[in-house]
Image (cartoon, rainbow, N blue to C red):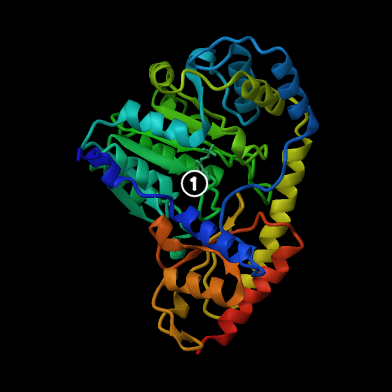
Amino acid sequence: MPQLAQRIGRAKPSAIMAVAEKAKALKAAGRDIISFSIGVPNFLPGPHVYAAAAEALSKDSGQYGVNRGADALLDAFLAHIARAGLTGYTRAHVATGIGAKHMLYNLAEALLDEGDTIAFAVPYWTTYQDIADIVNAKTLHLHCPASQNYKITPAQLDAALQQKPKVFLFNNPNNPTGMVYSKDEIAALADVLVKYPDTWVISDDIYHRMVFDGLGYHNFVSARPELRDRVIFVDSLSKTYGMPGWRVGFIAGPESVAKAVATLNSNHITNIPEVVTAAAIAALSGPQDVPDQKNREFEAKRDVVMAAMAAIPGVVCPRPQGAFYVFPDISCAFGKKHGDTVIGNDVEFCNVLLEAKGVACVPGSAFGAPNSLRISYTCPSAQLPEGLKRIQEFFAELT
Ligand code: PLP
């Protein structure tokens, strides 16, 4: 029998989906399950988005679209990033695709040859490692434990860039930690980046509208404009607009990179669908009350989760200021028993928690950080206190 390509051996199914699937199966078997696992925002966009999609359906052109994305969508995206302080970009600097995941994959293909190195922080969003593995890039991990608030320090970045990675992949606000870099922190990292002109910088900022505590969103290009010719900003409608299933992602960066992505699109997907394009324009250009309101709700939920974590002896939980994740260090539980079961690591912790209490969390090892677990708090508000209470009970029952 013929063999699959070697890259398929390097591709792993998503560890996050595995937890979500297990939780789903238990639910289907009649168990009362509260899921803190998957990172879906759990709200729908405003009615203007559906109206725009319906109108586009009624006017179907019957044609292929533009590889880079329709002009009206590029313009809507340019206005959207200008609101975030990213100005001076034109249509030639941007491109669209099937979600940020597809844009990241496109960027890996556009920027990395086999054997090149991509540097990123640990904990990382699982897909970073997987995409690097699929394109056969080497990974350089910047370890950022809870003791440094899961954030990269300038010294750490400097040491990593001295090893000349082709790409530095940054994520702010962060999945899985929810951490947000302040204006000063971004400026300090940007000062390091300017010293290494041969490294591309991908800034995955898909949660940039989800920042709390009045901290504001800051980026490398605003901090050091000379970085503009090698920073690529990645964005998506999935989280901000409650549209993960619509699959719309964007990049803004140097013209050569946007053109490369459009070329890859022309060979992979051709274009994002016309109906989706209309919905995306409506989301980006229409009233912003839904994302604004959701942001306030997430901030309040973050406080509820933090209060619950603070009440568990031994758990260390840096305070996130964005996205919708909390990433407690639960290693105090390792070596203890729940009933007769010894909890040796994060995966066992999450399995026993799910079995015993019906609460699904993602083990930190999915993000390269096996001392922790990820709580995604996008569940209905009414479920949140109950799920947290069960986690507290679980800890209290450990012997
Ligand atoms: N980047 C980060 C940090 C994410 O958390 C996610 C989704 O969870 C993505 C990218 C992918 O988003 P999209 O739905 O646009 O593909």
Left or right of 90, for residue 194: left
Residue placed most toward the observer, 374 or 342: 342
Residue found at x 58% / y 59%: 24
Residue under label 1, please give it: 185
Residue found at x 55% / y 42%: 183
Residue placed most toward the observer, 82 or 326: 326
Disc 1 within 8 angstroms of ligand 1 (CB):
no
Residue 75: name its quadrant.
top right
Whether residue 272 is visible, yes or no, is yes
Whether residue 330 is visible, yes or no, is no
Residue placed most toward the observer, 232 or 355: 355
Residue found at x 51% / y 50%: 175
Q: Position of residue 355 (x, y in %)?
A: 54, 74
Q: Position of residue 242 (x, y in %)?
A: 67, 40
Left or right of 157, for residue 272: right
Residue 198: name its quadrant.
top left
Q: Is residue 28 above or below residue 2?
A: below
Q: Position of residue 244 (x, y in %)?
A: 60, 39
Task: Please state which amino acid type lies under the numbered disc 1.
Answer: Glu
Task: Assign a secondary structure to mark 1.
Answer: helix
Q: Is residue 135 above or below residue 376?
A: above
